[in-house]
Image (cartoon, rainbow, N blue to C red):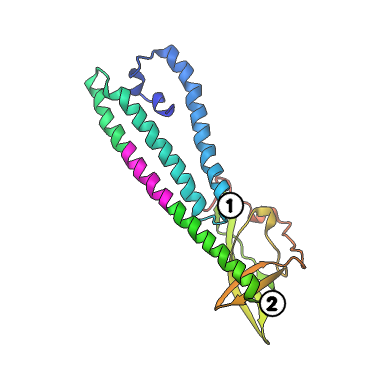
Amino acid sequence: MVLPGSFPPLLAVPGWNAWNLMWWIPLAFGATWVLITLIPGTYALFEDDFGNSASVGIRAATTSVSAGLSAATFAWSVPVAGHSDSFIAELAVLLRWGATGAAVVAACAALLVLTGIHGARREIARILLLREDARRVAGEIVTVPDPKQWILERPQFRIGVRFYDGASPRTIDVWMSTSADRVPVRGSGVLVYLGGGTTHVEADPDSPMTFSSDVSRYTAPSGGGGN
């Protein structure tokens, strides 16, 4: 709600003068800081809970930002609509359309959050079932490519995992999202669960994973890198 007050002609709505604006500037910077920290904060909270870096966290951040934008623009439309200047009063229509559009985005994103949570819980149930009933074999990481994409400075890549299914070696690709200081090196041991035509890969607690010491290789380029 603070941010619109930083832009003319909305300054004229409450009849502010230059001295009022001096007090408003630090509030605007504070609101901007809240907005900047809200997105990654909400993202990180949902990513920690559901582990789906490409969907649930982004949808949750979109929901919170869109809902806040909708409430803010609608609140500003009330004093704008009652202003004596016809040009300023006409801005209320645009603000309300903006509030409606942001509310629609927030509602859609919220539905996608619920869908993502349901999918994450279903995946958790599948993994727990595999842990109980599936065949478990030892494997190792054989390829760790250089990342070409980062999400919130976390490198994203597909690593190769090799294991023996009977007498035959098999290699599968596994999607990994991690931090730059926790990228495993080739040869690190993993557990592969096989059952029901599906596979699941986890770290092997009996074979502690070794992480690459070349952190700079996996650190996001300046500006965030990737997406």
Residue 137: numbered disc = 2
Which residue is identified by label 1? 49
Amino acid marked by disc 2: Val
Q: Is residue 211 left or right of residue 108?
A: right
User: Which element type, helix, strand or loop, lies under badge 1?
Assistant: helix
Quarter placement of the N terminus: top left
Marks 1 and 2: which is nearer the front? 1
| Residue 160 seen by the camera | no
Could you tell me residue 207's position as x and y percent? 77, 67
Residue at the left extreme, as displayed:
86
Few, some or many residues within 10 Å of mark 1 (<14, 14–19, 20+): few
Could you tell me residue 180's position as x and y percent? 65, 54
Amino acid marked by disc 1: Asp
Q: Main secondary structure of the magenta part?
A: helix
User: Which element type, helix, strand or loop, lies under badge 2?
Assistant: strand
Could you tell me residue 205's position as x and y percent? 74, 65
Question: Going 58% across and 71% down the picture, which residue do you hit?
Answer: 173
Looking at the picture, tell me which residue is in the foreground, 190 or 45.
45
Q: If you read the primary sequence from the N terminus, does the residue marked by circle 1 or circle 2 appear first?
A: 1
